[in-house]
């Protein structure tokens, strides 16, 4: 589990592509502290398992599914990436619950400055936007951000100077693809409100709008 608080910006050192997978090597410093093979590091919001590491670098395998759902499919040598180690049990919870399992990608369709902040407009598919709510949380390239506005085909976030200077978001331009992960709570609520498969038969969940209203929710 991650929190969406980026620890450092690394860079793709090498990417070796197979037919449906890849091995990626990333240059880094801070996230290597206390890290061993088998540990998890979020790379632009994608949870990857460290398979090898050395002074100033680590490598990870990238599955077919990950390449299909994320912007890593377009990564090349020198591409900057946000890095975060998995949350320590005694660490501070500065962002929100981030699984590192990207739901898909969005595209930056607007960038405008507002005094000391910068507003980003991100277009996305309806399958992602249905979980995006105003003042809720969303992860963009591994960064925990608050949604400022939502429309039918896009949403806005307002980003402070510190975040711009410490993450790859400050280097993003119009048309760039970004990884998106919805707040996982909304997906669980949707699942519980619907139907589930039990012993091969459809069984309606006991949680309904009427039940929630009855108990004051």
Image (tube, grey):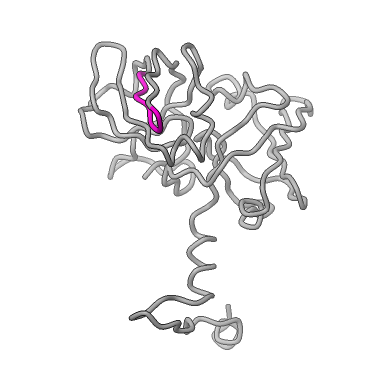
Residue 171 location (% of width, % of height): 62, 18
Q: Is residue 178 left or right of residue 196?
A: right
Q: Quadrant of residue 163?
A: top right
Residue 145 location (% of width, % of height): 59, 40
Q: Is residue 216 left or right of residue 82?
A: right
- Please tell me which residue lies in front, 104 or 122: 104
Q: Is residue 168 left or right of residue 37?
A: right
Residue 216 location (% of width, % of height): 58, 82
Q: Is residue 146 left or right of residue 110?
A: left
Q: Quadrant of residue 131?
A: bottom right
In the picture shown, does residue 192 fall above or below 41?
A: below
In the picture shown, does residue 26 fall above or below 196?
A: above
Residue 23 part of the magenta segment: yes
Residue 22 part of the magenta segment: yes
In the picture shown, does residue 65 fall above or below 19?
A: below
In the picture shown, does residue 65 fall above or below 76?
A: below
Residue at x 49%, y 43% (from the top left corner): 102
Residue 39 location (% of width, % of height): 25, 34
Residue at x 53%, y 75% (from the top left corner): 194
Residue at x 30%, y 22% (from the top left corner): 59
> How many tags in the picture?
0
Which segment is the magenta one? 19-25
């Amino acid at each position: 589990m991650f929190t969406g608080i980026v620890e450092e910006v690394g860079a793709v050192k090498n990417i070796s592509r197979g037919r449906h997978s890849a091995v990626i090597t990333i240059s880094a410093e801070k996230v290597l502290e206390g890290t061993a093979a088998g540990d998890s590091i979020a790379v632009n919001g994608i949870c990857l398992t460290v398979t090898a590491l050395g002074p100033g670098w680590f490598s990870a395998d990238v599955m077919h599914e990950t390449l299909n759902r994320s912007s890593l499919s377009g990564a090349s040598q020198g591409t900057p990436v946000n890095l975060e180690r998995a949350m320590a049990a005694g660490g501070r919870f500065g962002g929100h619950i981030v699984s590192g399992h990207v739901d898909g990608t969005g595209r930056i369709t607007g960038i405008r400055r507002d005094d000391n902040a910068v507003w980003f407009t991100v277009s996305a598919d309806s399958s992602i936007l249905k979980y995006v709510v105003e003042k809720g949380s969303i992860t963009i390239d591994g960064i925990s951000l608050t949604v400022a506005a939502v429309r039918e085909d896009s949403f806005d976030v307002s980003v402070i100077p510190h975040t711009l200077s410490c993450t790859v978001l400050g280097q993003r331009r119009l048309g760039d693809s970004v990884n998106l992960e919805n707040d996982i709570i909304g997906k669980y609520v949707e699942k519980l409100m619907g139907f589930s498969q039990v012993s091969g038969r459809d069984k309606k969940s006991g949680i309904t709008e009427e039940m929630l209203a009855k108990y004051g929710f």
